[in-house]
Image: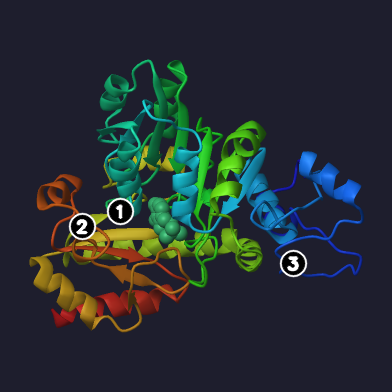
């Protein structure tokens, strides 16, 4: 609905009710649909209407509700839900590109995104040029005529470096390249990448959108033309669609998304401030602090520092491990955006695949720790961090 504000959209947008008038969104746990006649089946395969479904790999009423809700939130014409965030990343690129095409990508990427861009696409004959995402001059130099798409994470993992969505989009659009943004760290609450110039926005809904660590999922948001003519044919025939049960989980996750992201970001800001003043961490990275080199851009682009705080424990890997092991409330894992606070040691887990020079280049040092701030009481989280520092 035009004119609804975010929280109203998150509760109501996309809801479809069956003849029973159920209050909660129904899970249509069905792979297929029965046609009233052979003629109806024929017509539906020719062109399925908005409320007409064929097969769950193509679409499903529960999944459709989720797609409409996230498209409304993101402010895009349409969306397609996928089995995981990586199915969304892979689909957004593979549906568009063919051998001989050229893509420019930021270098600082989630490990599996890097694998797709560095290994998979190049294997299929797509040329990929990597740039330092925060450096606009590198984008300007690399995005030459003929570039088909640019890809970046609007805020990078784990060093929380921002890419200026508006500036890079302007450069890309001058040569007619499609701008695909992985917006997971920024969340759809803090950053509407399309309104800032991006063409396609991709989420791993495994993160903040589920927000309770239950299910893998992903979604691609964009224009009706891109979603239905480019992406959908690829996704529905290659098998990466979201299951109806997962869609139901994500629909329910969205209801509280705004409240959760804001509460988590408030706590993240408090924790980052405490870490900075406490002086135990040798470096604190949080875009919401004025010490962050891109603080002004973060405020303009997200109006928040987000829900993740990254910091360096002095003393390298040993000290970082002792810190992680001493935490009592904060769990050691590798998800983010969860209601439970999660701590990760990127150098030995999510980014362990990278060669040492690449890690150094991306600032992934042996003492670096990534904290995804959850919904616990922030004072308990601060106490947990303080006692863990006192142990080391
Ligand atoms: C987690 C993540 C993905 C991949 O999502 P999955 O749901 O795990 O497949 C992609 N990009 C970013 C930035 C992520 O954090």
Q: Is residue 187 above or below residue 30?
A: above
Whole-percent x, y for residue 342 in the image: 36, 71
Q: Secondary structure at mark 2?
A: loop
For label 3, the residue is: 28
Please report whichever mark, 2 or 3, sits nearer to the chain's N-terminal start: 3
User: Which quarter of the image is occupied by the N terminus?
Assistant: top right
Crowd rating for badge 3 (residues with CA inside 10 Å; few <14, some 14–19, many 20+): some
Crowd rating for badge 2 (residues with CA inside 10 Å; few <14, some 14–19, many 20+): few
Q: Secondary structure at mark 3?
A: loop
Determine which quarter of the picture holds residue 22: bottom right
Q: Are the residues flagged by discs 3 and 1 in contact, CB closer than 8 Å?
A: no
Determine which quarter of the picture holds residue 107: top left
Whole-percent x, y for residue 320 in the image: 16, 70
Q: Is residue 116 above or below residue 255?
A: above
Determine which quarter of the picture holds residue 120: top left
For marks 3 and 1, give the one nearer the viewer.
Answer: 3
Point out the quarter of the image occupied by ligand 1. Answer: bottom left
Q: Nearer the viewer, residue 318 or 237?
A: 237
The Cα atoms of the two marked residues, 2 and 3, are separated by: 40 Å
């Amino acid at each position: 609905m035009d004119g609804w504000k975010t929280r109203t959209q998150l509760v109501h947008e996309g809801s479809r009710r069956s003849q029973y008038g159920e209050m909660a969104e129904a899970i249509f746990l069905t792979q297929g649909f029965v046609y009233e006649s052979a003629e109806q089946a024929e017509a539906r395969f020719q062109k399925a209407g908005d409320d007409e479904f064929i097969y769950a790999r193509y679409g499903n009423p529960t999944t459709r509700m989720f797609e409409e809700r996230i498209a409304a939130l993101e402010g895009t014409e349409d969306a397609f839900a996928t089995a995981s965030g990586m199915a969304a990343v892979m689909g957004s690129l593979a549906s568009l590109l063919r051998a001989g095409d050229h893509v420019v990508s930021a270098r600082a990427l989630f490990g599996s995104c890097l694998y797709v861009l560095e290994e998979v696409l190049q294997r299929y004959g797509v040329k990929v040029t990597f740039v330092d995402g925060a450096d606009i001059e590198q984008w300007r130099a690399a995005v030459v005529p003929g570039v088909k798409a640019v890809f970046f994470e609007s805020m990078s993992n784990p060093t929380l470096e921002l890419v200026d969505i508006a500036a890079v989009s302007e450069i890309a659009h001058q040569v007619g390249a499609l701008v695909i943004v992985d917006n997971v760290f920024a969340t759809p609450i803090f950053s509407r990448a399309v309104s800032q110039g991006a063409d396609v926005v991709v989420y791993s809904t495994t993160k903040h959108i589920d927000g309770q660590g239950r299910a893998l999922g992903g979604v691609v948001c964009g224009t009706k033309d891109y979603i239905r003519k480019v992406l959908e044919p690829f996704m529905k025939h290659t098998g990466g669609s979201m299951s109806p049960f997962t869609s139901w989980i994500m629909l329910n996750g969205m209801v509280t998304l705004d409240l959760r992201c804001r509460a988590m970001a408030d706590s993240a800001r408090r924790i980052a401030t405490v870490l900075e003043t406490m002086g135990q961490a040798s470096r604190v990275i949080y875009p919401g602090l004025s010490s962050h080199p891109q603080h002004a851009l973060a405020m303009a682009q997200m109006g928040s520092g987000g829900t993740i705080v990254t910091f360096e424990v002095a003393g390298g890997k040993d000290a970082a491990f002792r810190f992680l092991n001493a935490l009592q409330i904060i769990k050691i894992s590798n998800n983010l955006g969860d209601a439970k606070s999660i701590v990760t040691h990127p150098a030995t887990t999510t980014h362990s695949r990278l060669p040492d020079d690449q890690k150094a280049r991306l600032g992934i040092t042996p003492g670096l720790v990534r904290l995804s701030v959850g919904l616990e009481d922030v004072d308990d989280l601060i106490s947990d961090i303080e006692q863990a520092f006192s142990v080391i």
